[in-house]
Image: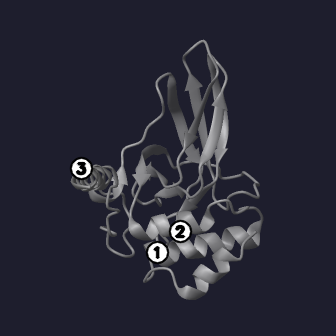
Amino acid sequence: MRNCLVITAAALLALGSICEKVPERGWERGFFRPIEETNKPWGMPAGLSLTSCIGADDEDTMVSLLPLLARVFNETGSRITTTLPAGTVFEPGNYEYQYMIILQPYVLTVPPDVDTTVTLPTFCCNEELDEPDDESYYTIHSQEWEVEMNELVALLKGKRLRGYPTLDLVQEALFEITDGEGLTDTMRTRLSSLP
């Protein structure tokens, strides 16, 4: 019996060290920016590089109100598939523009030795700043990982984010977090009811 208790205690300690505590929001409302305490480093896998990323000013898409247009180069001799995780933040080169974020995992496949253009389904993080356009340049910063953003990502998991009413709702929810006082119960209910 004593050995079982020792093993159970050791297992719980090991589990506790594996499970990370999700941090609270560290940025001030209305001034979203990725900060070290609330993000996880993320970048393209070996062999892939982001050669350019701009606002897709003239893109007509039903998967994002303001997508980014990215060119990804595969320098290997093999096709590479990678997933940008939910919460991937794109940092503007000019801070007059908004930070942008992906709220669901995005899978992209890049053929070998070629520059591939992809339209990223991004959402805006700073309501008062300029929307991305074809003169705004972006880089991948990190994966946002904090309590409020993780809740939004969880509410959107498996949801079909298509069409303007749905995209408007999701953008409104994101602004509740980044520029408002946090998700309201009404918004949680509306997001939960999405197909």
Identify the residue shown where x is 43% and y is 71%: 148
Instruction: Please say if 114 is above or below 171.
Output: above
Circle 3 packing at 10 Å, graded few (<14), some (14-19), many (20+), is: few
Do the residues bearing badges 2 and 1 touch, measured as CB atoms within 8 Å? yes
Instruction: Please say if 164 is above or below 52.
Output: below
State the SS at label 1. helix
How far apart are labels 2 and 1 at the CA level?
9 Å
Q: Quadrant of residue 189?
A: bottom right
Relative to the observer, which residue lies in front, 131 or 122? 122
The residue at which mark 1 appears reads as 177
The residue at which mark 2 appears reads as 152
Comparing labels 2 and 1, the label whose residue is closer to the camera: 2
Circle 2 packing at 10 Å, graded few (<14), some (14-19), many (20+), is: many
State the SS at label 3. helix
**On residue 87, which mark appears?**
none
- 104 displayed left or right of 101: right
Image x and y of residue 46, in percent: 46, 24
Q: Can you say which quadrant of the picture contains the N terminus?
A: bottom left
Image x and y of residue 137, in percent: 49, 45
Identify the residue shown where x is 76% and y is 58%: 62
State the SS at label 2. helix
How far apart are labels 2 and 3 at the CA level?
43 Å
Q: Residue flagged by tag 3: what amino acid is it?
A: Asn
The residue at which mark 3 appears reads as 3
